[in-house]
Image (cartoon, rainbow, N blue to C red):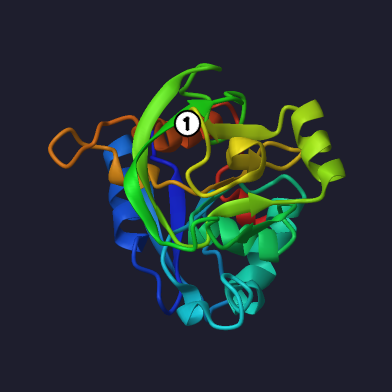
Amino acid sequence: MTAPRVGVVTFPGSLDDRDAARALRLAGAQTVSLWHDEADLKGVDAVVLPGGFSYGDYLRCGAIARFAPIMTELVPAARAGNLPVLGICNGFQILCESHLLPGALTRNASRHFICRDQLLRVEAADTAWTNSYSSGQEILIPLKSGEGSYAAHADTIAELEREGRVVARYVDSAPNGSQSDIAGITNEHGNVVGLMPHPEHAVEALTGPSRDGVGFFTSILAHLAKGAPVGAAAS
């Protein structure tokens, strides 16, 4: 059976795109490079928006990337629930700026860049990107960001909690000041997930800190194997 084709978008300033592609290949996916300046998803079955500093983080993190030609194809497909999308760190910021996810990522409460191995608790194990985990499972993956504090109106936080759309929380407390210790959220369809820590850096024991991140990438393969049509983005 042909492996699902998962696209990884490269923006000017992306620096984790190759890591994301490697994690997907280790999970068993066929990766497709997508360029920010081309409005063509190449018929992929899912997309990863990687970490980095898209367009140099000028104006505001993710604010310029929102208007990239590739997003003209990605946003409507994701909003309709047809295209699974994982936004990691800067990718999470882009998803919020594109209004595919609510809220915003703001400066860390400490005003310092944070780089550490971080324990997370998976809260929602029923999304396209988290079904390889169990609800309540704790995983260890790296966190590296300067603007990773999740913020939203109190009504939005209440809605996320009520609908079970908090994907992951920081264990004990958020090191960056995120409201409700939120590390990741999903949309109402469960196909779009934003995550501030970096699972693509925790897929091999050799490079550590664990292999706990690989579940995000095996999850999308399991989700697509359940019957999502090949080339869903192109339909």
In the rendered view, tell whether residue 233 sits above or below residue 191: below
Q: Position of residue 50 (x, y in %)?
A: 44, 59
Residue at left offset 44%, top offset 42%: 4
Identify which residue, 212 or 215, lies in the foreground: 212
Q: Amino acid at mark 1?
A: Ser
Res 197 seen here: yes
Identify which residue, 130 or 69, lies in the foreground: 130
Residue at left offset 55%, top offset 33%: 169
- Give the side of residue 223 with respect to residue 23, left or right: right
- Give the side of residue 127 with respect to residue 55, left or right: right
Residue at left offset 60%, top offset 46%: 178
Q: Position of residue 89 (x, y in %)?
A: 48, 55
Q: Position of residue 215 (x, y in %)?
A: 40, 30
The quarter of the picture where residue 60 lies is bottom right
Quadrant where the image shows the C terminus? bottom right
Quadrant where the image shows the N terminus? top left
Q: Secondary structure at mark 1?
A: helix
Residue that sits furthest to the right in the current view: 155
Residue at left offset 83%, top offset 44%: 154
- Dot 1 crowding, Cα within 10 Å, few <14, some 14–19, many 20+: many
Res 24 seen here: no
Residue that sits furthest to the front in the current view: 110
Q: Find disc 1 in the rendering and name its residue.
A: 219
